[in-house]
Amino acid sequence: MDVLTTKDLTKSYKGTTVVDQVNLTIGAGEIFGLIGENGAGKTTLMRLITGLTRADSGQVGLFSETTPAGLARARRRLGSVIETPALYPNLTAHQNLECHRLSCGITDQGASARVLAQVGLAEAGKKKVRAFSLGMKQRLGLALALVTQPDFVILDEPVNGLDPTGVIEMRDLIHALSAMGVTVLISSHILAELSQVATRYAIIHRGRILTTLTNAQLHEQCARALEIRVDDTAAATVQLETALGISNYKVVDAGQIRVYEHLDNPVGVATALTQAGVNVTRLTEVGDTLEDFFLATIQGATK
């Protein structure tokens, strides 16, 4: 089942298009990473999905609902933390949650304490928020999103500004939500961090979705490999398999092979191919870091 679908979703401010014909589909149970530079349109897209901002054109679908009345019902199944969590600094964590619980019409009086424990703030429930660290405020913001026991959680840059310990704690919380069957949409400008949690990604740049890919596809794009140019692809692959026992390779096109093994022995690979009568015209090590891939993708869109 698709939790979210968008069709040609578009939003402009003062003549500048900030979300440009976005088409996305997120399935139930996914941790979907929205990656983009600051100002790429991530927050505006999330505001459109949650109904905090109205689109100029296009359509949002939530849990198969697309009508205004249907979307209003479906959004009751959402929890979100967009931009800075709205917290009352002079109230305790528990009081903040109680205010939110009552405003959402949640009658379960144990919900606040339960959610505080879920995000690791059970011992801080009586502490005033003004004394909270940034990481604690981020976790309390997540607690606000979870009070309604949502099926779909939207988190806008939840690790921004956190120290390494806070990042790990937030990552663990997101994994825990996914294990409970909650679908998560999470944004960041740091692809390496998203790669620790997301199962699928979309890269957004200047309001447009440039590409979507799975976690496996992302790491395949960034995998280190020996890229070999030969005159006889068939003979080369036979030699790689029989002489070197290599099975992890890919024929890119006629005359070009990528080998994901023996990266520490390129001379041995070239020698084995040459001894079989294969002419090797080029052998180089290739592969991008996650940051390289992200930058190459957005730079390619601006050419």
Image (spheres, helix red, strand yellow):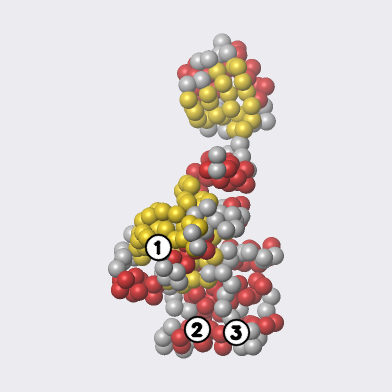
Q: Amino acid at mark 1?
A: Asp
Q: Is disc 1 surrounded by few (<14), some (14 to 19) or many (20+) residues within 10 Å?
A: some
Left or right: 72 with respect to 154?
left
Q: Could you say which quadrant of the image residue 136 lies in?
A: bottom right
Image x and y of residue 43, in percent: 52, 63
Element under label 3?
A: loop
Residue, x 49% and y 75% (percent of image)?
Answer: 146
Disc 2 or 1, which lies upstream in sequence?
Answer: 1
Q: Nearer the viewer, residue 205 or 12?
A: 12
Query: Foreground mark, 1 or 3?
Result: 1
User: Considering only vertical position in the picture, is 98 above or below 50?
Assistant: below
Tell me the quarter of the picture where residue 182 sits. bottom left
Mark 1 or mark 3: whose residue is earlier in sequence: 1
Q: Which mark is residue 100?
A: 2
Q: Position of residue 232 (x, y in %)?
A: 50, 15
Identity of the residue furthest to the front in this view: 15
Is residue 107 rendered to the left or right of residue 215?
left
**Residue type of the residue flagged with mark 2:** His
Question: Which percent across, then down, holds residue 114?
Answer: 51, 81
Pick the front one: 276 or 107: 107
Q: Residue furthest top?
A: 277
Label 3, on which residue?
88
Q: Identify the residue under disc 1.
A: 56
Quadrant of residue 274 within the rendered picture: top right
Whether residue 16 is visible to the viewer of this picture, yes or no, is yes
| Distance from Cα at disc 1 to Cα at disc 3 | 33 Å
